[in-house]
Amino acid sequence: MTERQPVPMPSSPDTLLTPREHYVMDRVVCGDNDRQIGHLLGISPQTVTHYVHGVCLKLGVPNRTAAAVWYDLRHGQPATEDGRQPPHEPLSPQERRVIELVAEGVGDPQIAAHLGVSFSSVRQYLLSVRRKLDAPNRTAAAVEYYRQERALSHMKKTGGDNEG
């Protein structure tokens, strides 16, 4: 297997995405599906899919999950204002590896091959991660995982949680 590349984090200006694409990505980050987003915007789910695909192309990422993680890292709330705490039940090392691969845009069959586990094991790990992070889907779970990682990193740097 070839070596994995990290999720690209372009440093392009905020004008890279249109206002409509920003709105769609805000909803993708929240875990909304294309049908839900389409309903909010009064457009078809296929049009939402087209917007998400366009964002993926602009950002140079493989799929909506990688785009959502990139988007939240760039446009989400800073760790100092996030207010989130680590999950009540910590992720296992294998669950962490799975969600990190998901965030990079790697598909379940490739994750299974990379980790040397079955496809159904990958699905079970993802269900467990979603439950622990209280996320409605894999995209929201990946975003939440990195939000919590930022919050933990901030806490380690400042010696505590949000003081002030």
Image (cartoon, grey):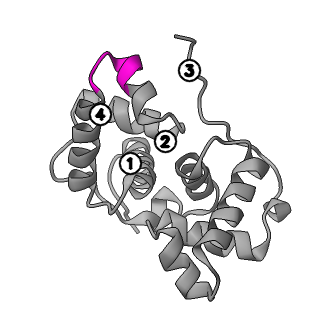
Crowd band around label 1 with a 10 angstrom C-alpha radius: few (<14), some (14–19), many (20+): many
Disc 1 marks which amino acid? Tyr
Query: Would residue 63 be found to the left or right of residue 152 on screen?
Result: right
Q: Earlier in the sequence, mark 3 or mark 1?
A: 3
Quadrant where the C terminus sits is bottom left
Observer-side mark, 3 or 1, equals 3
Place of residue 68 in the rendered image (x, y in percent of width and height, measured from the top left): 56, 55
Is mark 1 in CB contact (under 8 Å) with mark 2?
yes
Q: Mark 1 = which residue?
A: 145
Magenta residues, start to end: 112-118
Q: Mark 2 = which residue?
A: 103
Q: Residue at x 63, y 41 (%)?
A: 62
Depth check, front residue: 129 or 84: 129
Element assignment for label 2:
helix
Place of residue 36 in the rendered image (x, y in percent of width and height, measured from the top left): 48, 78
Disc 2 marks which amino acid? Ala
Q: Mark 4 = which residue?
A: 122
Depth check, front residue: 15 or 3: 3
Element assignment for label 3:
loop
- Determine if the magenta segment contains residue 117: yes
Element assignment for label 4:
helix
Q: Earlier in the sequence, mark 1 or mark 4?
A: 4
Residue 123 to residue 132: above or below: above
Crowd band around label 3 with a 10 angstrom C-alpha radius: few (<14), some (14–19), many (20+): few
Q: Mark 3 = which residue?
A: 4
Element assignment for label 1:
helix
Q: Residue at x 75, y 57 (%)?
A: 54
**In terms of image quadrants, where is residue 8?**
top right
